[in-house]
Amino acid sequence: MLVGLRSWFDWAVALLAGGVTATLFVVVMLGVISRAANDPFIWTDELARFLMAWVAVLGWVLVSRRRVHVRIRYFRDKLPPPVRRVAEIIMQSSLVVFGVLVAWFGVAVTIRNLDIEATTLPISISWLYVPLVLAGVVTALQGIAEIVEQCRPVASPVGGEAGK
């Protein structure tokens, strides 16, 4: 069931990221076209900023979930396997702490800005900070999942020695 839930979440985030990216494109093009027509829509810049924040965070979530984020593994790969596992657990633990802090401060800044309205849009400026909460929670959960994976025993090959 957990695998199905993760697959559904990954699919939903990818779909949302695609939709937000397409919306960002349309909004930016509306701004360009309206300026070219010498009658600019005043709301396109601000909405583009909101959408860009969401695109960035949804991209962060996608690459984290797919394990394709930038990582320099050169030195870690030089370590013997048991030490490599410990190093990975330490790195993932720091990501859990980072994710919790991002979520915690994301909630705080979102709440602090609830009563502030955007300049050209009839919405709260706090919607600019809501993606931080999502990114922090997903980063922490992903780090926990990676730690659990590192703590599982290494399966030894059939007919061979473990650790080769």
Image (cartoon, grey):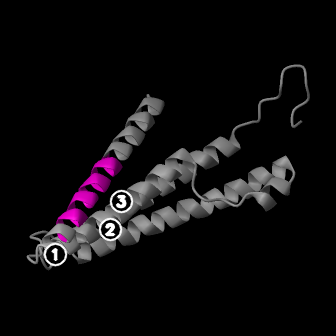
Residue 164: give x, y in percent of width and height.
Answer: 89, 36
Q: Residue at x 47, y 63 (%)?
A: 100
Tell me which segment is drawn in magenta.
Answer: 16-31
**Which residue: 14% across, 80% down?**
119
Indicate which disc residue 147 carries: none
Q: Toward which corner of the image does residue 32 lie, by quadrant?
A: bottom left
Q: Secondary structure at mark 2?
A: helix
Nearer the observer: mark 1 or 2; the answer is: 1
Q: Amino acid at mark 2?
A: Val
Dot 1 falls on a residue whose secondary structure is helix
Q: Nearer the viewer, mark 1 or mark 3?
A: 1
Please report whichever mark, 3 or 2, sits nearer to the chain's N-terminal start. Answer: 3
Residue 150 position in % (x across, y down): 69, 45
Residue lying furthest top: 159
Tell me how far mark 3 sits from mark 2, CA to CA: 19 Å
Residue 135, position as x, y percentages in the image: 42, 59
Give the mark nearest the N terminus, 1 or 2: 1
Across and down, in percent, residue 125 comes to 21, 73
> Alpha-carbon distance for marks 1 and 3?
24 Å
| Residue position for label 3 | 55
Residue wearing tag 2: 107
The residue pinned by badge 1 equals 35
Q: CA distance from mark 1 to mark 2?
A: 36 Å
Q: Quadrant of the N terminus?
A: top left
Is residue 48 rendered to the left or right of residue 151? left
Q: Secondary structure at mark 3?
A: helix
Q: Is residue 6 left or right of residue 155?
A: left
